[in-house]
Amino acid sequence: MSDEFYIGYHNKCPPTLAQRTRRRVTQLAVLVVGLMSLFAALQTPAEPGVFEYGVGRSFEGVLYERPLPLLRSVSKDGSMTHFLLVGAGKHGLPAFARGHDGQYVRFRGSLIQKDANVMIELNDPNSFTALGPGTIPEESPAQAVIQDITLTGELVDTKCYFGVMRPATGKGHRACAVRCLSGGVPPGLLVRNPEGNPVVLLLTGPRGQSLQVDPEWGARRIRASGRLVWNEDTPRLEIVSLSLADGGGE
Amino acid sequence: MSSTYRAIDWNRQKRLYDLTLLGFLFLGLGTFFAVSLLHSPNATAETLIIRGCAATALMLLHVILCIGPLARLDTSFLPLLYNRRHLGVTMFLLALVHGVFSVAQFHALGDENPLVSVFTAYQRDYRLLDAGRINGAHFPFEPFGVAALGILFLMAATSHDFWLRTLGATFWKTMHLGVYAAYGLILVHVALGFLQSERAYLYPVLLGLGFALVAGLHLLAALQEARLDREQSRLNAEGFTGTCQVDEVVEGCGKVVIARGQRIALFRHQGRLYATSNVCRHQGGPIGEGRIAEGCITCPWHGWNYRPEDGRSPPPFQEVLATFTTRIVGDRVWVNPTANPPGTRCAGGAVTSS
């Protein structure tokens, strides 16, 4: 037994005890670095995505409210882009932008992008201007029916998944998915394509109607049956039936 | 508290302790952020803050819970125990950052009050069984974190000695044992939340190892104390109780003995053997594991002082320990296990050289 005795309010720790404490602190530091590295390295890598938070851009084009709110916009080089539209926070198309189906509109918003999926957060009501009936040649985006299909995947809120939150899947994100779906953010079905890459199918009701999805199913695995429609550059599933597919009840 | 009656400020050791703690915070969070950015460069800053603070807080909580039994098993850990409260408050602050960012990230700016949403976002899953199986996969995990944060707040807010004096040592200590409830709630929070999202099998293994370490150290310390208690109880007799050999108590040192089921602290000071209650009036520290410093019994936990002959703290302090009458017969120390009123002066058994 060492004769040294530790008294915290003395200015100096006894020498042998101080040396032993330094050794323990060093060992603890190595342990902390090791465990935190391990903890960080074991995380599932987040998928890429962009949310230009706080950055406002000007957009214009024809606004469609159904089956999902989107802006059909033609760039200077003539290429067509379809932007899904959502509101600020965990909300779908904001009230100030509703009632303008088929009209040519101009507004400022923040871009959200994941691969080919593009979305605009409309967060500046004062910039929203309806300029009259749509002037783009096609009245509405061209559609191609692919097949009737049943798919199983995670029900995601597209705003988070396309770039606002990374990661935006799983139970850790479930409450956010519930709030977003409840607030009107377009729902999506996250599935894997034959190459194993994640793909999100936008979900709507049959014949282009809006889909009423139970928000509490957010971030859970669901089985979706319906008609797969290729909406120009965007896959969409017109839902006939939905059910939980993760072994749980409602 | 000090026998020289100077207020205890941020002395060198305290500053070293807190600087080391700060260094560990930077090291832990810095390592997490750096490795996460390399491994998962697309993760948002909010995600890194939420996860980094959670991981650092959980690791710190394990350290906090291990220090107590470690210091009982090996006194060289006592320097880590001295300012354990600073670890606790720091841990709470990390957990608070985790909680605030999580509520803002996952619940705010929606169609429901975020503080309500924390409890109701998927309220239909508040059920133990789902389709005949335990509902671990879907049961809400957020309320467990909120409850743990509430307990940690209560402890951090009452960590100052003002509250110790105001609430009384027994109530204060009992309340602060709530850290074990908070630990349990946090384990459930992590198991139902993070472990359901992240599938790496090492995560539950690490969490299980942490729990095993905490539980194992507590069990070891309890077993060691039980063994000592049994040895001492064997020596009990009627009235005065034979406790130990005189030379087992070293000059200037303490020893814990058992007499009629209670722990008594023996101290040898200037050729006499004194006995007091083994429970420090400050935080219930084990007085008998302390030493005599500057003429006073000194508690090993926070240096609280008591005079060996009457159990009183030197003026102006007011704390008083119960004393016990001791006798030395032959080379054996006998103690009357009926406590004298606190502060009763005792002559102490005289140690004669044989």
Image (spheres, rainbow, N blue to C red):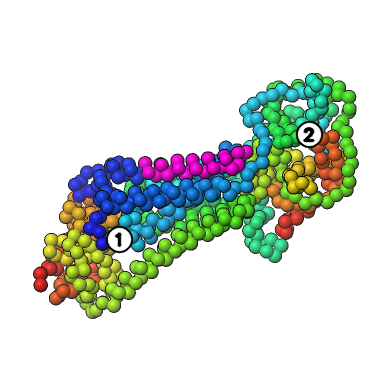
In the rendered view, does A101 fall on the left or right side of B82? right
Gap between marks 1 and 2 measured at Cα: 69 Å
Say which residue label 2 marks.
A69
Chain to which the residue tagged by mark 1 belongs? B
Instruction: Residue A19: give x, y in percent of width and height.
Output: 30, 50
Q: Secondary structure at mark 2?
A: loop
In the rendered view, does B84 fall on the left or right side of A154? left
Give the magenta-colored segment's residue range.
B19-42
Instruction: Residue B31: give x, y in percent of width and height.
Output: 50, 43
Residue B125 lies in the magenta stretch: no
Within 10 Å of the Cα at label 2, are there few (<14), some (14-19), or many (20+) other Cα atoms?
Answer: many
Q: Quadrant of residue A82?
A: top right
Q: Are marks 1 and 2 in contact (CB under 8 Å)?
A: no
Name above or below for residue B254 compared with residue A118: below
Q: Quadrant of residue A244?
A: bottom right
Task: Tell me whether marks 1 and 2 sit on the same chain.
Answer: no
Give me the disc on residue B137: none
At 46% from the left edge and 58% from the top edge, which residue is drawn? B180
Q: What kind of residue is marked 1? A: Pro
In the rendered view, does B44 fall on the left or right side of A230? left
Residue closest to the eye, A65 or B189: B189
Within 10 Å of the Cα at label 1, are there few (<14), some (14-19), or many (20+) other Cα atoms?
Answer: many
Instruction: Residue A236: give x, y in percent of width and height.
Output: 82, 41
Say which residue label 1 marks.
B286
